[in-house]
Image: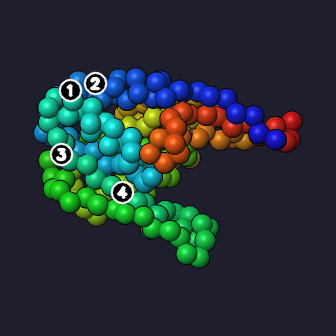
Amino acid sequence: MNNQKEILTGEDIKRTLYRLTHEILEKDLDPKNIVLIGIQTRGVHLAKRIKNIIKELENYDIDLGILDITLYRDDLTAIGPKPVVKETKIDFDLSGKVAILVDDVLFTGRTVRASLDAILDFGRPKRIELLVLVDRGHRELPIRADFVGKNIPTNAGERVEVHLQEVDGKDEVVVLRNTDNR
């Protein structure tokens, strides 16, 4: 049996994305030097929302890339014989840019490691930063986010799920606690 606890509501997510966007702009100042790269799937939608907030605040339309890391995963053989590869689209020059990777949940760090490998196949940005909506801990690699929406302490038996309107029909972040073994 699973217990579900809502951590962020839709309104919380909206406020968090505005705060994170302000943090990006305060750190990097000129949006012309910033590109966003959303990691499939929910990271793409979060990146699109941040892009729209920057457009609203700065009246500037920054570049947005889409990244699928499936073929860069270190556990590719474990995910099945026919992994589903989604769209990757980075059709702009990364040189001299601050590339901000956007993902929904930071957990072990392996997705981010794969993302770094993938991005470098498209060019060499000035700097790569990481923005996550949720950092749940339990890192297996020495990776940390530059911009964090919310830190959520979890144990290994819990799952953090980010639901977004574009994919799931609603905005929320929930922690699922497995109560079978307790």
Coordinates of residue 168 in the picture (x, y in percent): 53, 45
Give the number of the mark in front: 3 or 2: 2
Give the number of the mark in front: 4 or 3: 4
Residue annotated with mark 4: 67
Sequence-wise first label, 4 or 2:
2
Asked if marks 3 and 2 touch (Cβ < 8 Å), the reply is no
Give the number of the mark in front: 4 or 1: 1
Apparent side of residue 32 relative to residue 43 in the rendered image (left or right) = left
Q: CA distance from mark 3 to mark 2?
A: 18 Å
Q: Which amino acid is tagged 1? A: Leu
The one nearer the camera, 141 or 53, is 53
Q: CA distance from mark 4 to mark 1?
A: 25 Å
Sequence-wise first label, 3 or 1:
1
Q: Which amino acid is tagged 2? A: His
Q: CA distance from mark 4 to mark 3?
A: 17 Å
The one nearer the camera, 54 or 70, is 54
Coordinates of residue 140 in the picture (x, y in percent): 56, 47
Give the number of the mark in front: 3 or 1: 1
Q: CA distance from mark 3 to mark 1?
A: 20 Å
* Secondary-structure class at tag 3: loop
Coordinates of residue 21 in the picture (x, y in percent): 30, 29
Residue drawn at x 43%, y 54% as measured from the top left: 40
Residue annotated with mark 2: 22
Sequence-wise first label, 3 or 2:
2
Residue drawn at x 14%, y 32% as measured from the top left: 59
**Residue 66 versus residue 136 in the image, above or below:** below
Residue annotated with mark 1: 57
Q: Callout 1: 10 Å neighbours few (<14), some, many (20+)?
A: few
Q: Callout 3: 10 Å neighbours few (<14), some, many (20+)?
A: some
Asked if marks 1 and 2 touch (Cβ < 8 Å), the reply is yes
* Secondary-structure class at tag 1: helix
